[in-house]
Amino acid sequence: MIGIFDSGVGGLSVLRAIREQMPGLPLTYLADQAHVPYGPRPLEEVRAFSTEITRHLLSRGAQLIVVACNAASAAALHHLRAAFPQVPFVGMEPAVKPAAECTHSGVVGVLATPATFQGALYASVLERFAGGVTVLQDTCPGLVAQVEAGDLAGPRTRQILTRALEPMLAQGMDTVVLGCTHYPFIIPLIQEITGPAVRVIDPAPAVARQVGRVLAARGWLQGSDGPPAAMTFLTTGELEPFKALLTRLLAGCCPPAQNDSCEAVRWHGGSLA
Ligand code: DGL
């Protein structure tokens, strides 16, 4: 079983890609909606949440953990690998590399949360891949909350995106990197604002391919191309709104089916039960 987590529903964009490539893998997804958004929080706090969520997913039988959150990857990936040395992890980093490879104008935009921009991971991505390219950044305050509220195209969501993207477009940006897993759900609106000539990079398919490579290296891929396996969805927030949003965000790919389950889990102090 693969354990996947995010601060909220954003990591479903990664779950969706994993499901499309390897439908036969049993998946358990945990949305830490009691704490969303992670982006404005101190890195130590996000690290503590990520460590306990990992422990919880492992206690449910997860054999590989996908940190489907750029903020949690920035804050905790290094620490998680050290704390659980026997467990394979797949994390996220803003896809500056493919953006730098495909930009013609030499101007790339990155939309991500403050935690992601602060982490050492992002600094290292820029150092390794952004040579000769101008990278513009925006934290899009409030945008994660809009996606959590299911507002994928309303006036407020449009306003936040327009404020972020227009100055980037004015500086010649031709490629935009989605450095937050919530944002693939608003690609239609992003593309409407940028126009069709701007390339939008969603890293989820590449992350799913990396999951496949890690599983293959351990000989754990058998059955992954088989019939759809059961999925379990967990939230630390309110169950009913979570279910409604799940159905909406996964429609067209893998809407929760009869044999999938959906449960609430609760934080008690620093522990999940
Ligand atoms: N979806 C997450 C990310 O990729 C977290 C967003 C947040 O909670 O601030 O960064």
Image (cartoon, rainbow, N blue to C red):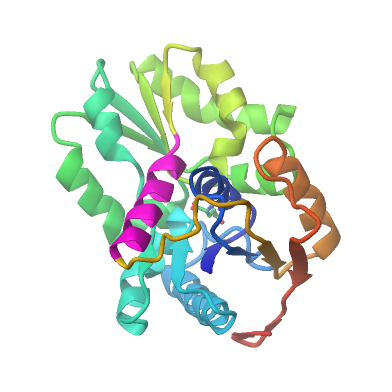
Q: Quadrant of residue 35?
A: bottom right
Q: In this view, does 271 lie to the left or right of 202?
A: right
Q: From this viewpoint, is residue 215 visible? A: yes
Q: What stretch is highlighted in magenta?
A: 202-217
Residue 92 in view: no
Q: Which of 81 and 79 is in front in this view?
A: 81
Q: Which of 70 and 132 is in front in this view?
A: 70
Rendered view: 126 above or below 192: below
* Quadrant of the image occupied by residue 146: top right
x, y (%) of residue 108?
32, 28
Image quadrant where one finds the C terminus = bottom right
Q: Is residue 92 left or right of residue 260?
A: left
> Residue 25: x percent and y percent?
54, 59
For the point 38% across and 47% down, the residue is 209
**Residue at 39% over, 59% down:** 91
Give the main secondary structure, helix, strand or loop, of the magenta stretch: helix
Locate residue 88 relative to residue 239 in the image: left or right: left
At x 60%, y 24%, the residue is 188
